[in-house]
Image (tube, grey):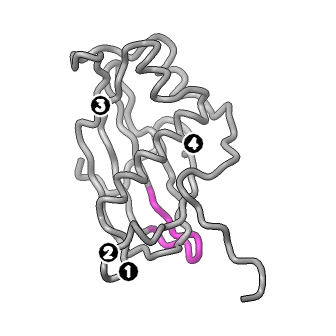
Amino acid sequence: MTSPAPENILGERHETLVRVRYAETDKMGIVYYANYLIWFEIGRAEFCRARGFSYSEMEENNDAFLVVAESYCRYKAPAYYDDELLIRTNITELRKRSLRFGYEVVRLADGQIIAEGETGHVVTDSKGRVRSFPEGFAQRLQSPPIVKVSQPAGDLVPTKTGPE
C-alpha cells in the first residue's frame, strides 16, 4: 500500500462529516496521527450503512468479519481542534475474499486535503479462517447508496450561531 491517492474503481465515494474534538489533539493542538485510522473506520462503517447493512449484521448473521490486514496513511497537512473534516471513502479493490477501501480527509473550511490512505481487509469467519464474502454483500458494496445517512458520524460540536 504505497499509493497515496487510491483510485476509485467501484463507483462513488461516500462522505462522512466529523469535527475534531479536543481529546483528538496533542500538546501542540494538532490531531494525533492515530486518530486518522479511527476516522477511516468511521468512513467505511458509514459507507456500508449507506448501502443498507452494518458490520454487525455480517458478523452476527453470516459469521463474516472484515479483518484489517493493512493500513496506510499519508499526512499532507495538519488538522486542528474544532476543524470540520470530510472523510471521503470508496472501494478501490473488491475480490472474492478481500477488499480495499480508499480514504481522503478534507478540511471543509479551505478544501485542503489533509490526509489520504487505504485499508486492506480480509474476510474471515469467527475462528479467523479466510472465507468468501457472504452471498449478496459484495454486490451491495458495489451498488450505489440506498440509504442517506442524515446524522453526521462521530461527536460533532454544534456550530456557534449566537452572539458571544
Which residue has dot 3 on it? 67
First to last magenta residue range: 104-113
User: Who's the residue at 28% across and 36% down the image?
Assistant: 68
Q: Is residue 164 left or right of residue 99?
A: right
Q: Which mark is residue 26?
A: 2
Which residue has dot 4 on it? 12
Residue 33 appears at what percent x and percent y? 30, 65
Q: Is residue 152 left or right of residue 60?
A: right
Asked which secondary structure carries label 1, the reply is loop
Q: Is residue 114 left or right of residue 107?
A: left
Q: Are marks 1 and 2 in contact (CB under 8 Å)?
A: yes
Q: Which mark is residue 29?
A: 1
Examine the structure image and report whether residue 156 is included in the region drawn in magenta: no
Q: Amino acid at mark 4?
A: Glu
Q: In which quarter of the view is residue 125 placed?
A: top left
Find the distance from the CA under tag 2 to the CA under tag 3. Answer: 28 Å
**Mark 2 crowd level (few <14, some 14–19, many ≥20, 10 Å Cα):** few
**Mark 3 crowd level (few <14, some 14–19, many ≥20, 10 Å Cα):** some
* Sequence order check, earlier mark of 2 and 3: 2
